[in-house]
Image (spheres, helix red, strand yellow):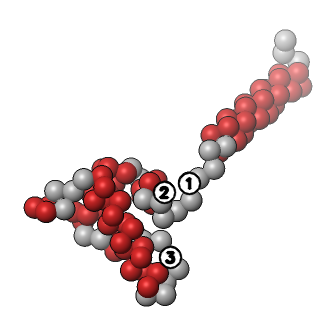
Amino acid sequence: MSGGKYTENDAKELLRRKSAELAEAGETRFPKRADFSDEQVVAIKSYLGPWPRALEAAGIKEPRDGDRIEKNREKRRRAKRRRREAQLAQKDSTGKT
């Protein structure tokens, strides 16, 4: 962290340290972007990705459910099926073939 250059490990350590500070202060929240300087936020996000993923990478937050992608796919399939059924029903009700 010397000279304003951060590494991936530095970014994780910043998050862990802030999380520990918050816990010592009796707060039960995750570190927020506002808890860090702009330079630190840029470093954290550049190495660790979006804020929720950065918290996961630092071991502060539980990883999100990996099944979410499949749930989203199934939701899109159901929506597409409903749209197609609605199109066919409309086509049948107008008498077109």
- Res. 73 image quadrant: top right
Residue type at mark 1 is: Pro
Q: Where 85 falls versus 13 (above or below)? A: above
Q: Quadrant of residue 76?
A: top right
Q: Earlier in the sequence, mark 2 or mark 3?
A: 3
* Residue 14 versus residue 79 in the image, above or below: below
Between 17 and 74, the one lying in front of the other is 17
Element class at badge 3: loop
How far apart are the two marked residues, 1 and 2, measured between alpha carbons?
A: 5 Å
Residue closest to the far top: 97
The residue beneath circle 3 is 29
Q: Which residue is mark 1?
A: 63
* Amino acid marked by disc 3: Arg
Q: Residue at x 16, y 56 (%)?
A: 5
The residue under the point 84% across, 12% down is 97
Q: Which class describes the residues within 10 Å of circle 1: few (<14), some (14-19), or many (20+)?
A: few
Is residue 97 visible in the rendered image? The answer is yes
Tell me whether circle 1 and circle 2 mark residues in contact (CB < 8 Å): yes
Q: Could you say where residue 21 lies in the image, as x and y percent from the top left? A: 39, 80
Farthest residue in the left direction? 3
The residue shown at (13%, 63%) is: 2
Which badge, 1 or 2, is on the more N-terminal residue? 2
Residue 83 coordinates in the image, percent (x, y): 75, 31
Relative side of 86 to 18, left or right? right
Q: Which residue was labeled with disc 2? A: 56
The residue at the point 35 percent across, 72 percent down is 17
Note whether residue 83 is visible: no
Q: Nearer the viewer, residue 85 or 71?
A: 71
Most extreme residue toward the bottom, as rendered? 25
